[in-house]
Every structure is written in structure tokens, then in C-alpha cells.
Amino acid sequence: MEEQDIYHPYFITLIKTFQMKRNLVKIVLVAAGLSLLVVDASAQGRRGNRRGNNPPTNDQQQQQNNNNNPPGNYPTNGNIPYRYDSSASGGLDTVLRRSLRQESAFAEDSSTTLIPLDYEYLRKDDALYAEKVWRELDLREKMNQTFRYEGKEGDGDQQFMTILLKAVTSGKVMAFQDDRFTQPLTQADIQTIMGGGVGADTSKVTDVNDPSKIVEYVITPKVFNVKDIQKIRIKEQWVFDREASRMFCRIIGICPVKTAYFEGTKRERGVEPLFWIYYPDLRNLLASHQVYNSKNMGASRMTWEELFESRMFSSYIIKSELDNSSNKTIQAMIKDPILRLLEGDNIKNRIFDYEQGLWSY
């Protein structure tokens, strides 16, 4: 018992000393760890600064570009002004500018309510011969120059296509999608077909002294130009009436055809038929507009209705029902353009010869 009492305090002191040393070692290790973390963070910061001077990688550059690029609807022109060009050529001149004084030495007929003569009635039983023919008028031909007269008179622009398109867009006559007049077109469809006012072209104007400096942007609206219509298609029917013993020609429909060009050139790419108009619905309107008097044949001027009924235009046949069981155009059957014209003349001569062959002398 006495030996245990003597060594007991010694063991207690030894244990306390060991615990103090262990706590001191822990404190030193923690302090060393914190110092290492601080040194490593400082080193990484210095390496990051040095790395920032190096060129970025592709992924980093792409990400930076995506962050720097503005959205698509953000104006990127800076302070460069825009100017709207309202002098674009084309469109339909719907403004009537009547003269406030008498323009001629004699009083002109200002009547616009002329009514065309009714057609002679044709009975189906008397139709000994009937054939439908499709023609095409090229307005660039000399005989068809009256269709392109650009004069301004009391009833507006005198171009035939302007008169026709104004009647369609105003709703005076109905337009159809096909030559059988089965699908009428709405005004929205007409505007889409004509394409006027849809979209615009923007061009930049540079400084004369410094071509690299942009002065302004000019916005030019897209308008429908009636001069792009250089051809007209006509659907007609030739009927030989046995009671009258003569051949009648009745126009059934009219179709304006727009010429399409290859982009940036004047080389024709093809033609685009716009719509069909039933000709009997158009007769009253055509009778109210006079034709340009190119031959100066006195003071009287014929109307557009009289011009069509008198056949005072130049055309060529593009399709007929004669020996055409496949219902194809001449262009689809004959590729050579000269042979197509000859085939059209052949169809015209066959119609003429049929009537002449019925007479005996």
C-alpha cells in the first residue's frame, strides 16, 4: 500500500505531461496546415494572373463571343441613321388627276358609262365546229405597244395592266386561280400574288471621301411594278355557227403573265401566270376606257373592248384542243422555239381553212 501511494502521483504527472504534448502537436499541425493553404492560394492567384495573359482556347473564345454578341433584334448600327426611300418605281397609280381646264380644241366625251353591245346568241345545236385556243400576247411587240402607253389622263394611268389590276384590287371584277374559273381569289391572295409591299431591301451609303465609312442606310420597299408584266394570255373559243354561216370568236378569259428573271441579270428564267379573269365580267370596264390612238386616226378613239373584239393585237397560239388528247401546251410537246411558233401558225391555218373549206364557188 505504501509503494502504491508513492508511485501514484508520478503516474498522474506523466499522464498529464503526455496529454499536454499531444495537444501541442495538434496545434502545431493545424497551424502548419493553415499556413500551407494560405501559401497555395497565393500561388494559384499568381499563376491565374500569368495565365490570363495567354490567348484563350477555342472553347473559351466561343463562350466569350456568345457572351459578347448582342441578340438578333438588337440594333447594331450604332448611331448611323436610316432613311426610307419613298421614290421606288412601280406600284399602281390610283390617284386621279383631272385637268382644271379644257386640254383640247374641242369638247371631249367625258362619259364613263359606256355599255358594250351584247353578243349574238349562239345555239349549241348550231355549233358545227367549236375549238378552244390559248394565245399569248407579247406586249414588247410593235403592234402591242398600245398596251404599254404610260400616259396620264382624267381616268388615271392608261397602261392596260394598270387598268386591269386596279379593277381586281378594288373588287370590281373577280380573279380566279385557274383558267376554268373554279377557285376565286380573295384580296389577301391577290396581294400575296402581286407581292407588292412585302419585305424591303436595305442598302448602305458610304462616304465619298472615305468608302469605309457608312453615312446612312437606305430602306427601299418592294413594290409591284406593272412593267414586269410583259405578256398576256387569252383563252378563247372559235365556233362556226351553221345558222349564220360564219365563224365566231369569243374571248373567255384573260391572264396577266409576269416575267421572272435570274437574280441580278436580265435573262428570262420563265413566266409566272398571276390569275385569270372572266372576260364577260370585264367587258363593261374595258368599254369605259379608251385606247391610246397611236395612228392619229381622227378625234375618235376606240375602247379596250372594241380593240379585243376587233382583234387588233398580235399574238401566237400556245395551246389548243385540236389533236391534243394529252391536254399539253405546245411548249411541253415541242422544245424548239421556232418549231413551236410554226405549230401555232399551223393551228391558226387549220381553223381558217375549215371555214373556207365550207364554201363552194
Image (spheres, grey):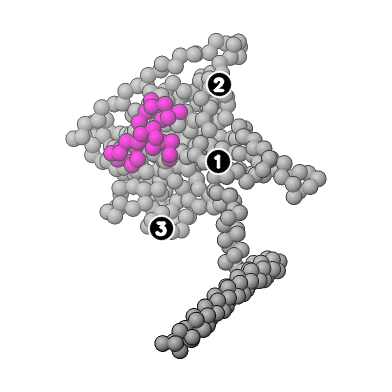
Counting from the top left corner in percent of width and height, residue 36 is at 62, 73
What type is the residue that disc 3 sits on? Ile
Quadrant of the rendered image containing residue 174? top left
What type is the residue that disc 2 sits on? Glu
Counting from the top left corner in percent of width and height, residue 154 is at 53, 18
**Mark 1 vs 2: CB contact within 8 A:** no
Label 1 Cα neighbours within 10 Å, binned few <14 / some 14-19 / many ≥20: few
Q: Label 1, on which residue?
A: 200
Camera-nearest residue between 18 and 159: 18
- Report the residue at 41% width, 87% height from top: 1
- Kindly give the residue lying farthest to the bottom in the view shown: 3
Could you tell whether 204 is left or right of 262 in the image? right
- Kindly give the residue lying farthest to the left in the view shown: 125
Decide: is 285 above or below 17.
above
- Where are the magenta residues, as a range? 166-193
**Mark 1 vs 3: CB contact within 8 A:** no
Disc marking residue 334: 3
